[in-house]
Image (cartoon, rainbow, N blue to C red):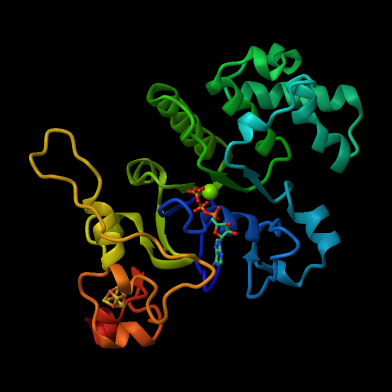
Amino acid sequence: MDGISFDLERGQTLAIVGESGCGKTSTASAILRMLPRNVAKYEGRVEFDGKDLMTLNNEDFRTQVRWRAVSIVFQGAMNALSPMIPVGRQVAEPLMLHLDMDKEEARAKTEEAMESVGLPRYTVDRYAHELSGGMKQRVVIAMALVMRPSLVILDEPTSALDVMTQANIMNLLKQLKEEQGLSYIFITHDLGLSSELADWVGIMYAGQLVEVGPAETVFPKPTHPYTQKLLSSVPRLKSEEKPDSIPGTPPDLTSPPKGCRFHPRCPFVFEKCKSFEPPFFGQTDRSACWLLEAGG
Ligand SMILES: Nc1ncnc2c1ncn2[C@@H]1O[C@H](COP(=O)(O)OP(=O)(O)OP(=O)(O)O)[C@@H](O)[C@H]1O
Ligand code: SF4
Ligand SMILES: [Mg+2]
């Protein structure tokens, strides 16, 4: 992942949106320093509550930041719950490991966490196979909340669920955000879903952020050609208009195109785009596109 930059205030949600394979999960893993060791090289700044997290060594990062301040609901986490251990014990594990709680104390906190995500307290003794998809997703959200972090990264938290269950989980996320003043980084390929929760939106293409701005500006009036294409590719009920599609395929990230990475697929491409990478232009809504140079 290269050149990613964004700010997020407490209680706000940033939605990161992009096609499959554009690097959303890698971005989330990088924030928590959880990229595979053989590929990971971390550069830049991640500032949180006024502290530059990049200056922390790995041990301090692990004990002070991960799960306590920033937690993550991994993509597909509900399918990775252990079938051998009651789900409550899996939720309680970080409390015993990081906060040195004894079994009883951890169980009480876990029951509270289950209740806060709309599950009965007795769920702690259930095994994953005894729960529905929606219940399992609530368990992994409880897992991310149990250490009381202020920022939660949600990587495609509803994409494996049917639409009704998806709506229930979205409502739960909204309610938790209001009750606990949580900030979210909400990762999705679904523009519709992102608009439900987002205060800010970041659009990713080929491992880079290409547009970032307030949701109320980006959704009605996107400035990057890729975002424009992405928005017009969303099918609308009751509309006669055919959804647009983007010609070509996303590039191989091991050898991305020179210049603007979107140039082979962009309808507005011109010479400069093929050789020079565009910086961000714009004030509140910022886009990396040469068309916006000098106010475009
Ligand atoms: N900037 C980058 N440069 C090179 N490779 C990258 C970059 N970002 C991601 N990748 C690689 O691309 C692949 C897909 O990335 P990732 O899983 O983050 O995509 P994603 O957007 O989460 O996709 P999905 O929507 O399918 O979950 C991974 O193998 C990752 O290592
Ligand atoms: S920089 Fe050029 S190729 Fe890239 S999005 Fe803008 S117009 Fe299209
Ligand atoms: Mg992903």
The residue closer to the viewer here, 190 or 98, is: 190
The residue closer to the viewer here, 214 or 246, is: 246
Q: Quadrant of ligand 1?
A: bottom right
Image-based side of 241 in relation to 54, left or right: left
Residue 154, position as x, y percentages in the image: 55, 44
Name the residue located 38 percent from the left edge and 87 percent from the top edge: 276
Residue 91, position as x, y percentages in the image: 74, 30
The residue closer to the viewer here, 75 or 164, is: 75
Name the residue located 25 percent from the left edge and 80 percent from the top edge: 291
Q: Residue furthest left?
A: 240
Name the residue located 89 percent from the left edge and 33 percent from the top edge: 101
Residue 241, position as x, y percentages in the image: 10, 44
Q: Where 198 sits versus 61, above or below?
A: above
Residue 84, position as x, y percentages in the image: 79, 20
Name the residue located 89 percent from the left edge and 25 percent from the top edge: 103
Image-based side of 223 in relation to 15, left or right: left
